[in-house]
Image (cartoon, rainbow, N blue to C red):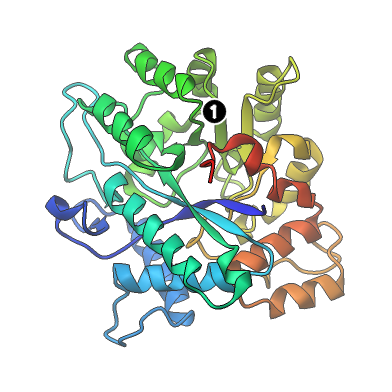
Amino acid sequence: MKIDMHFHIIGNGIDINNVDNDVYMYADDNHHWFTRILYNLVEDDLARMEADLNSDGKISTSEYFDVVYRLVTSAEEIDGVVLLALDAVYSPRTGKINKQKTDLWVSNKFLSRKVRELNDHLQNESDAGKRKKRFFFGASINPNRKDWESELEYVITQTDAVLIKIIPSTQHIYLMDDRHRNFYNALSSYNMPLLCHVGPEYSFPEGMRKKHLDNFKYLEKPLEHDVTVIAAHCSTPVFPMIDPNLIGEFYSFMKKANSDGKVRLWADTSALSLSTRLSFIQQIVETFPSKWLVNGSDFPIPIDGWPHLPLVTHDITPEEYIAICKTKNPLDRDVRIKRAHGFADSILRNAERVLRLPRN
Protein backbone atom coordinates (compact mmCIF):
# COMPACT_ATOMS: atom_id res chain seq x y z
CA MET A 1 0.00 0.00 0.00
CA LYS A 2 1.29 3.46 -0.92
CA ILE A 3 0.92 5.56 2.20
CA ASP A 4 1.26 9.24 3.06
CA MET A 5 2.10 8.97 6.74
CA HIS A 6 2.35 12.66 7.62
CA PHE A 7 -0.99 14.41 7.10
CA HIS A 8 -2.20 17.06 9.55
CA ILE A 9 -5.70 17.76 10.79
CA ILE A 10 -6.86 21.32 11.43
CA GLY A 11 -10.21 22.93 12.17
CA ASN A 12 -11.90 26.00 13.61
CA GLY A 13 -13.16 25.03 17.06
CA ILE A 14 -12.40 27.63 19.72
CA ASP A 15 -13.75 25.87 22.81
CA ILE A 16 -10.84 24.04 24.44
CA ASN A 17 -13.30 22.17 26.65
CA ASN A 18 -14.91 20.61 23.57
CA VAL A 19 -11.83 18.89 22.12
CA ASP A 20 -13.41 15.44 22.09
CA ASN A 21 -16.00 16.75 19.63
CA ASP A 22 -14.09 19.25 17.51
CA VAL A 23 -10.60 20.39 16.58
CA TYR A 24 -9.42 23.20 18.84
CA MET A 25 -7.44 25.76 16.86
CA TYR A 26 -6.90 29.16 18.41
CA ALA A 27 -3.61 31.05 18.35
CA ASP A 28 -4.81 34.65 18.69
CA ASP A 29 -3.60 34.78 22.29
CA ASN A 30 -0.18 33.39 21.38
CA HIS A 31 0.50 34.33 17.75
CA HIS A 32 3.82 35.08 16.14
CA TRP A 33 3.86 37.37 13.11
CA PHE A 34 5.16 34.54 10.91
CA THR A 35 2.41 32.11 11.88
CA ARG A 36 -0.23 34.70 11.05
CA ILE A 37 1.16 34.84 7.51
CA LEU A 38 1.45 31.06 7.23
CA TYR A 39 -2.09 30.39 8.45
CA ASN A 40 -3.44 32.88 5.91
CA LEU A 41 -1.49 31.12 3.14
CA VAL A 42 -2.86 27.74 4.21
CA GLU A 43 -6.40 29.09 4.32
CA ASP A 44 -6.01 30.65 0.86
CA ASP A 45 -4.68 27.35 -0.49
CA LEU A 46 -7.65 25.46 0.95
CA ALA A 47 -10.02 28.04 -0.49
CA ARG A 48 -8.56 27.36 -3.94
CA MET A 49 -9.46 23.71 -3.35
CA GLU A 50 -13.06 24.87 -2.79
CA ALA A 51 -12.98 23.88 0.87
CA ASP A 52 -15.35 26.68 1.88
CA LEU A 53 -18.48 24.78 0.88
CA ASN A 54 -21.00 27.19 2.36
CA SER A 55 -19.11 30.31 1.18
CA ASP A 56 -19.09 31.94 4.62
CA GLY A 57 -15.41 32.92 4.36
CA LYS A 58 -14.33 30.31 6.92
CA ILE A 59 -13.24 26.70 6.66
CA SER A 60 -14.90 24.64 9.35
CA THR A 61 -13.60 21.38 10.76
CA SER A 62 -16.24 19.41 8.86
CA GLU A 63 -15.39 21.23 5.61
CA TYR A 64 -11.72 20.38 6.14
CA PHE A 65 -12.57 16.70 6.52
CA ASP A 66 -14.60 16.92 3.31
CA VAL A 67 -11.45 18.14 1.54
CA VAL A 68 -9.40 15.37 3.11
CA TYR A 69 -11.84 12.72 1.92
CA ARG A 70 -12.00 14.17 -1.56
CA LEU A 71 -8.20 14.35 -1.92
CA VAL A 72 -7.59 10.81 -0.73
CA THR A 73 -10.34 9.20 -2.79
CA SER A 74 -9.25 11.01 -5.96
CA ALA A 75 -5.49 10.47 -5.49
CA GLU A 76 -3.75 8.33 -8.09
CA GLU A 77 -0.43 8.02 -6.26
CA ILE A 78 -1.64 7.39 -2.69
CA ASP A 79 -3.71 4.51 -1.29
CA GLY A 80 -3.88 5.61 2.33
CA VAL A 81 -3.02 8.46 4.67
CA VAL A 82 -2.15 8.70 8.36
CA LEU A 83 -4.18 11.53 9.89
CA LEU A 84 -2.29 13.05 12.80
CA ALA A 85 -3.64 14.07 16.18
CA LEU A 86 -1.78 16.67 18.24
CA ASP A 87 -1.88 16.72 22.01
CA ALA A 88 -2.01 19.92 24.07
CA VAL A 89 0.87 21.70 25.80
CA TYR A 90 1.48 20.53 29.37
CA SER A 91 3.89 21.94 31.90
CA PRO A 92 7.01 19.75 32.21
CA ARG A 93 7.09 20.71 35.90
CA THR A 94 3.47 20.31 37.02
CA GLY A 95 1.90 18.18 34.27
CA LYS A 96 -0.98 20.65 33.99
CA ILE A 97 -2.30 21.91 30.67
CA ASN A 98 -1.15 25.30 29.41
CA LYS A 99 -4.18 26.60 27.55
CA GLN A 100 -2.57 29.79 26.27
CA LYS A 101 0.37 27.96 24.69
CA THR A 102 -1.93 25.33 23.16
CA ASP A 103 -2.69 26.64 19.68
CA LEU A 104 -3.86 23.39 18.08
CA TRP A 105 -5.32 20.40 19.89
CA VAL A 106 -6.58 17.43 17.92
CA SER A 107 -7.61 14.95 20.59
CA ASN A 108 -7.20 11.20 20.25
CA LYS A 109 -10.84 10.55 21.06
CA PHE A 110 -12.06 12.98 18.40
CA LEU A 111 -9.73 11.90 15.61
CA SER A 112 -9.94 8.15 16.20
CA ARG A 113 -13.72 8.45 15.88
CA LYS A 114 -13.43 10.52 12.69
CA VAL A 115 -11.03 8.00 11.15
CA ARG A 116 -13.54 5.21 11.78
CA GLU A 117 -16.28 7.33 10.18
CA LEU A 118 -14.13 8.04 7.14
CA ASN A 119 -13.31 4.37 6.67
CA ASP A 120 -16.98 3.45 7.04
CA HIS A 121 -17.75 6.02 4.36
CA LEU A 122 -15.20 4.40 2.06
CA GLN A 123 -16.83 0.98 2.43
CA ASN A 124 -20.15 2.44 1.32
CA GLU A 125 -18.70 3.78 -1.92
CA SER A 126 -19.96 2.23 -5.15
CA ASP A 127 -16.51 2.73 -6.72
CA ALA A 128 -14.36 -0.32 -5.94
CA GLY A 129 -11.22 1.80 -6.23
CA LYS A 130 -12.39 4.09 -3.46
CA ARG A 131 -13.27 1.14 -1.25
CA LYS A 132 -9.60 0.09 -1.38
CA LYS A 133 -8.44 3.40 0.07
CA ARG A 134 -7.72 3.66 3.78
CA PHE A 135 -7.44 6.26 6.53
CA PHE A 136 -5.13 5.52 9.45
CA PHE A 137 -5.11 7.08 12.89
CA GLY A 138 -1.93 8.74 14.15
CA ALA A 139 -2.30 9.40 17.89
CA SER A 140 -0.51 12.06 19.93
CA ILE A 141 0.42 11.89 23.61
CA ASN A 142 2.44 14.51 25.42
CA PRO A 143 4.55 12.65 28.01
CA ASN A 144 4.49 15.76 30.21
CA ARG A 145 0.81 15.24 31.02
CA LYS A 146 0.06 13.66 34.40
CA ASP A 147 -2.26 11.07 32.90
CA TRP A 148 -0.13 9.96 29.96
CA GLU A 149 -0.40 6.32 31.08
CA SER A 150 -4.20 6.27 30.95
CA GLU A 151 -4.17 8.15 27.64
CA LEU A 152 -1.76 5.61 26.17
CA GLU A 153 -3.89 2.76 27.50
CA TYR A 154 -6.90 4.28 25.75
CA VAL A 155 -4.96 4.62 22.49
CA ILE A 156 -3.67 1.06 22.65
CA THR A 157 -6.88 -0.66 23.72
CA GLN A 158 -9.61 1.48 22.16
CA THR A 159 -8.14 2.69 18.85
CA ASP A 160 -6.23 1.43 15.83
CA ALA A 161 -3.41 3.94 16.26
CA VAL A 162 -0.46 3.28 13.95
CA LEU A 163 1.98 5.70 15.61
CA ILE A 164 2.41 8.39 18.26
CA LYS A 165 3.16 11.90 17.01
CA ILE A 166 4.92 14.66 18.97
CA ILE A 167 6.45 18.05 18.20
CA PRO A 168 8.91 18.71 21.06
CA SER A 169 9.12 22.48 20.67
CA THR A 170 5.40 23.04 20.18
CA GLN A 171 4.47 20.72 23.04
CA HIS A 172 7.34 21.73 25.38
CA ILE A 173 8.83 18.22 25.46
CA TYR A 174 12.48 17.72 26.37
CA LEU A 175 13.17 14.29 24.90
CA MET A 176 16.24 13.72 27.08
CA ASP A 177 14.27 14.17 30.30
CA ASP A 178 14.80 10.98 32.27
CA ARG A 179 11.24 11.24 33.59
CA HIS A 180 10.06 10.11 30.14
CA ARG A 181 11.79 6.71 30.36
CA ASN A 182 8.57 4.92 31.36
CA PHE A 183 6.79 6.52 28.42
CA TYR A 184 9.49 5.28 26.03
CA ASN A 185 9.47 1.81 27.58
CA ALA A 186 5.71 1.63 27.12
CA LEU A 187 5.95 2.60 23.45
CA SER A 188 8.62 -0.03 22.93
CA SER A 189 6.61 -2.74 24.67
CA TYR A 190 3.61 -2.05 22.41
CA ASN A 191 5.77 -1.75 19.25
CA MET A 192 4.35 1.73 18.79
CA PRO A 193 6.56 3.93 16.58
CA LEU A 194 7.21 7.54 17.55
CA LEU A 195 6.91 10.16 14.82
CA CYS A 196 8.91 13.11 16.09
CA HIS A 197 9.47 16.50 14.54
CA VAL A 198 13.13 17.47 14.30
CA GLY A 199 14.67 20.56 12.75
CA PRO A 200 13.14 24.03 12.35
CA GLU A 201 9.42 24.34 13.16
CA TYR A 202 7.69 27.41 11.72
CA SER A 203 4.07 26.23 11.80
CA PHE A 204 3.49 27.02 15.49
CA PRO A 205 4.48 30.02 17.63
CA GLU A 206 5.95 27.73 20.29
CA GLY A 207 7.92 25.96 17.57
CA MET A 208 9.94 29.10 17.04
CA ARG A 209 10.17 30.05 20.70
CA LYS A 210 11.30 26.60 21.85
CA LYS A 211 13.27 25.60 18.76
CA HIS A 212 16.15 24.19 20.83
CA LEU A 213 13.88 21.25 21.76
CA ASP A 214 13.73 20.02 18.13
CA ASN A 215 17.34 18.81 18.12
CA PHE A 216 17.67 15.45 16.35
CA LYS A 217 20.41 14.43 18.79
CA TYR A 218 17.76 14.21 21.51
CA LEU A 219 16.26 11.22 19.67
CA GLU A 220 19.07 9.29 21.30
CA LYS A 221 16.95 8.86 24.42
CA PRO A 222 13.89 7.08 22.90
CA LEU A 223 16.27 5.04 20.74
CA GLU A 224 18.09 3.93 23.89
CA HIS A 225 14.78 2.52 25.11
CA ASP A 226 14.33 0.58 21.86
CA VAL A 227 11.61 2.81 20.45
CA THR A 228 11.29 2.85 16.67
CA VAL A 229 11.55 6.51 15.72
CA ILE A 230 10.54 8.38 12.57
CA ALA A 231 12.29 11.73 12.23
CA ALA A 232 10.06 14.17 10.39
CA HIS A 233 11.40 16.13 7.41
CA CYS A 234 14.81 14.40 7.46
CA SER A 235 15.81 17.14 9.93
CA THR A 236 16.28 19.50 7.00
CA PRO A 237 16.49 23.31 7.09
CA VAL A 238 13.49 25.31 5.95
CA PHE A 239 15.12 28.57 4.90
CA PRO A 240 18.59 28.80 3.33
CA MET A 241 20.89 31.34 5.00
CA ILE A 242 18.74 31.23 8.15
CA ASP A 243 18.63 27.62 9.30
CA PRO A 244 21.87 25.64 9.69
CA ASN A 245 22.29 22.76 7.26
CA LEU A 246 22.70 19.68 9.46
CA ILE A 247 21.78 17.09 6.83
CA GLY A 248 25.23 15.48 6.92
CA GLU A 249 25.28 15.36 10.72
CA PHE A 250 21.80 13.84 10.81
CA TYR A 251 22.84 11.18 8.30
CA SER A 252 25.75 10.22 10.55
CA PHE A 253 23.33 9.99 13.48
CA MET A 254 20.99 7.74 11.44
CA LYS A 255 23.86 5.58 10.29
CA LYS A 256 24.93 4.94 13.87
CA ALA A 257 21.36 4.20 15.00
CA ASN A 258 20.88 1.70 12.16
CA SER A 259 24.39 0.24 12.26
CA ASP A 260 23.39 -3.35 13.06
CA GLY A 261 21.18 -3.68 9.98
CA LYS A 262 17.87 -3.13 11.76
CA VAL A 263 16.20 0.18 10.91
CA ARG A 264 15.45 1.78 14.28
CA LEU A 265 15.52 5.34 13.01
CA TRP A 266 13.53 6.28 9.94
CA ALA A 267 13.11 9.69 8.31
CA ASP A 268 10.07 10.97 6.47
CA THR A 269 9.99 13.16 3.38
CA SER A 270 7.20 15.46 4.55
CA ALA A 271 7.35 19.09 3.40
CA LEU A 272 10.41 18.45 1.23
CA SER A 273 8.43 19.76 -1.76
CA LEU A 274 8.31 23.17 -0.06
CA SER A 275 9.84 25.76 -2.40
CA THR A 276 12.22 27.04 0.30
CA ARG A 277 13.79 23.55 0.52
CA LEU A 278 14.64 23.37 -3.18
CA SER A 279 18.33 23.92 -2.61
CA PHE A 280 18.51 20.98 -0.21
CA ILE A 281 16.63 18.30 -2.16
CA GLN A 282 19.56 17.00 -4.21
CA GLN A 283 21.67 16.58 -1.08
CA ILE A 284 18.80 14.73 0.64
CA VAL A 285 18.30 12.36 -2.31
CA GLU A 286 22.02 11.62 -2.53
CA THR A 287 22.52 11.27 1.24
CA PHE A 288 19.72 9.10 2.61
CA PRO A 289 19.19 5.53 1.36
CA SER A 290 15.62 4.78 0.35
CA LYS A 291 15.46 1.85 2.78
CA TRP A 292 15.49 4.41 5.64
CA LEU A 293 12.80 6.71 4.22
CA VAL A 294 9.01 6.86 4.39
CA ASN A 295 6.69 9.13 2.44
CA GLY A 296 4.76 12.08 3.84
CA SER A 297 3.27 15.27 2.42
CA ASP A 298 2.77 17.48 5.53
CA PHE A 299 -0.59 18.59 4.12
CA PRO A 300 -2.06 21.24 4.45
CA ILE A 301 1.35 22.92 4.16
CA PRO A 302 1.21 24.19 0.54
CA ILE A 303 2.69 21.91 -2.12
CA ASP A 304 3.68 24.11 -5.05
CA GLY A 305 4.86 22.56 -8.30
CA TRP A 306 5.87 25.64 -10.24
CA PRO A 307 9.18 26.38 -8.40
CA HIS A 308 10.62 22.98 -9.40
CA LEU A 309 11.91 24.27 -12.71
CA PRO A 310 13.20 21.85 -15.39
CA LEU A 311 16.97 21.48 -15.88
CA VAL A 312 17.51 23.73 -12.86
CA THR A 313 16.34 21.70 -9.88
CA HIS A 314 17.95 18.27 -9.88
CA ASP A 315 17.56 17.42 -13.57
CA ILE A 316 13.78 17.64 -13.73
CA THR A 317 12.78 17.36 -17.38
CA PRO A 318 10.36 19.73 -19.14
CA GLU A 319 7.92 16.82 -19.50
CA GLU A 320 8.04 16.09 -15.79
CA TYR A 321 7.61 19.76 -14.96
CA ILE A 322 4.55 20.10 -17.18
CA ALA A 323 3.01 16.97 -15.65
CA ILE A 324 3.65 18.30 -12.13
CA CYS A 325 2.10 21.67 -12.89
CA LYS A 326 -0.96 20.00 -14.41
CA THR A 327 -1.50 17.80 -11.36
CA LYS A 328 -4.39 19.25 -9.36
CA ASN A 329 -4.39 16.85 -6.43
CA PRO A 330 -1.67 18.08 -4.02
CA LEU A 331 -0.99 14.54 -2.73
CA ASP A 332 -0.25 13.36 -6.27
CA ARG A 333 1.74 16.52 -6.95
CA ASP A 334 3.90 15.91 -3.89
CA VAL A 335 4.73 12.36 -4.98
CA ARG A 336 5.47 13.40 -8.56
CA ILE A 337 7.76 16.22 -7.43
CA LYS A 338 9.78 13.83 -5.29
CA ARG A 339 9.89 11.18 -8.03
CA ALA A 340 11.18 13.76 -10.51
CA HIS A 341 13.90 14.76 -8.05
CA GLY A 342 15.06 11.17 -7.76
CA PHE A 343 13.31 9.73 -4.70
CA ALA A 344 12.55 6.03 -5.21
CA ASP A 345 8.95 4.88 -5.34
CA SER A 346 9.81 2.31 -2.66
CA ILE A 347 9.51 5.01 0.02
CA LEU A 348 5.76 5.05 -0.67
CA ARG A 349 5.46 1.49 0.63
CA ASN A 350 8.05 1.57 3.39
CA ALA A 351 5.43 2.78 5.86
CA GLU A 352 4.05 -0.76 5.97
CA ARG A 353 7.38 -1.81 7.52
CA VAL A 354 7.26 0.69 10.38
CA LEU A 355 3.64 1.57 11.21
CA ARG A 356 1.66 -0.43 13.77
CA LEU A 357 -0.96 -1.33 11.19
CA PRO A 358 -4.25 -2.91 12.34
CA ARG A 359 -4.53 -6.58 11.45
CA ASN A 360 -7.72 -6.08 9.46
- The residue at 31%/51% (across/down) is 106
Q: In the visual, does 146 lie left or right of 130?
A: left
In front: 205, or 132?
132
On the image, the x and y values in percent for residue 82 come to: 50, 51
Query: Most extreme residue toward the bottom, as rendered?
Result: 55
Q: Is residue 53 visible?
A: yes
| Location of residue 220 with respect to 84 vertically, above or below | above
| Location of residue 84 with respect to 22 vertically, above or below | above
| Location of residue 187 with respect to 302 vertically, above or below | above
Q: Quadrant of residue 181?
A: top left
Other-residue count near label 1 (Cα within 10 Å), few / some / many at <14 / 14–19 / ≥20: many
Q: Which residue is mark 1?
A: 216
- The residue at 53%/65% (across/down) is 302
Amino acid beneath label 1: Phe
On the image, the x and y values in percent for residue 197 come to: 48, 38
Q: Is residue 209 visible?
A: no
| Location of residue 222 with respect to 166 vertically, above or below | above
Q: In the visual, does 222 lie left or right of 290?
A: left
In front: 304, or 257?
257
On the image, the x and y values in percent for residue 345 come to: 77, 52
In front: 240, or 113?
113
Q: Quadrant of residue 63?
A: bottom left
Secondary structure at badge 1 equals helix
